[in-house]
Image (tube, rainbow, N blue to C red):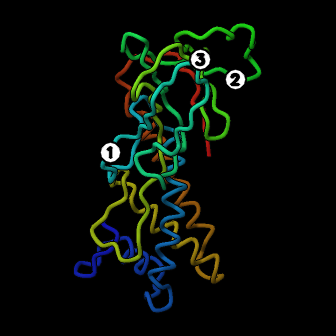
Amino acid sequence: MVFSDTSTNLGIIQDITFKTGVSTDNFPIADRTRSINNWYMKTTGWIIMADGRWQWDDSNQTDQPVATTDIVTDQRSYTVVKNLPSANQDWLVVTKVQIKDSDGNWIELKPIDNRQINEERFTESGTPEYYDFEGTEIKLYTSPNYDSTAGLQVWFQRAPLLFAADDTTKKPGFASIFHEILSLGAKYDWEVAKETGNPEQTMRDIMNMKKNIEDHYGRRNNYEVNRIRRPYRRYK
């Protein structure tokens, strides 16, 4: 479903009009857009929480969800947020951290909590094996004993590319069969704000679709053999 289509009235903006019975004079497009984006963020959260081994990314994105920086000898801490594909793009979930060893081979690092760190164990530099995040800073254990250009990569899941009020053909970046949840969410916001309609029933409709979304994204890779996976670390 596109964001807005005044010729066919099949866009999300027009579906809100159909569901609420209220024109854009009384429920302005700017307010609808804000509500749509809020529900877009909520829906993204549900998808990420339910997502299987095939990790979701907004289909409107034009780059890979990875931040890259140089490795410097004896430097333990690195700031990666400044190296995101877009400086204004929210990163929600770190999915993988990779580093090049001194021979240029990629190695996946393992997460470690600072409460598990024995500083005596990591006094000597070498090839890092672990990483830990402190805010927007990533720390490597051990510190590298070599330099490597673009030798550290942080892969992540990110927030969606939100709508602008003047968008038309742009679509939500998740499965099209669930796009209606954005107009349902806006309908719910309108009913609560104006104390009208049946917001309880609208919320039940939203929760039913939420369950379908979680079922859909949770089963996307059910042909693969199940295996134990380390928990994601969430940052937001």
| Mark 1 burial class by Cα count in 10 Å: few <14, some 14-19, many 20+ | few
Circle 3 sits in a helix, a strand or a loop, which is it? loop
227 up-or-down from 209: above or below: above
The reply to whether dot 2 and dot 3 touch (C-beta < 8 Å) is: no
Residue under label 3: 143
In this view of the protein, which residue sits in the foreground, 15 or 152?
152
Q: Please state the horizontal and vertical placement of residue 137, each as a whole percent of the image.
A: 61, 36
| Residue 153 falls in image quadrant | top left
Q: Mark 3 or mark 1: name the one nearer the start of the chain.
A: 1
Residue tagged 2: 113
Location of residue 139 by image quarter:
top right
Q: Using the image, determine if residue 174 lies above or below residue 223.
A: below
Q: Gap in Å between the C-alphas at discs 2 and 3?
A: 16 Å
Q: Is residue 49 left or right of residue 102?
A: right
- Between 142 and 159, the one lying in front of the other is 142
The amino acid pointed to by label 1 is: Asp
Tell me the quadrant of the picture where the N terminus can be found: bottom left
First in sequence: mark 2 vs mark 1:
1
User: Is label 2 or label 3 in front?
Assistant: 3
Q: Which residue is mark 1?
A: 63
Q: Nearer the viewer, mark 3 or mark 1?
A: 3
Q: Are marks 3 and 1 in contact (CB under 8 Å)?
A: no
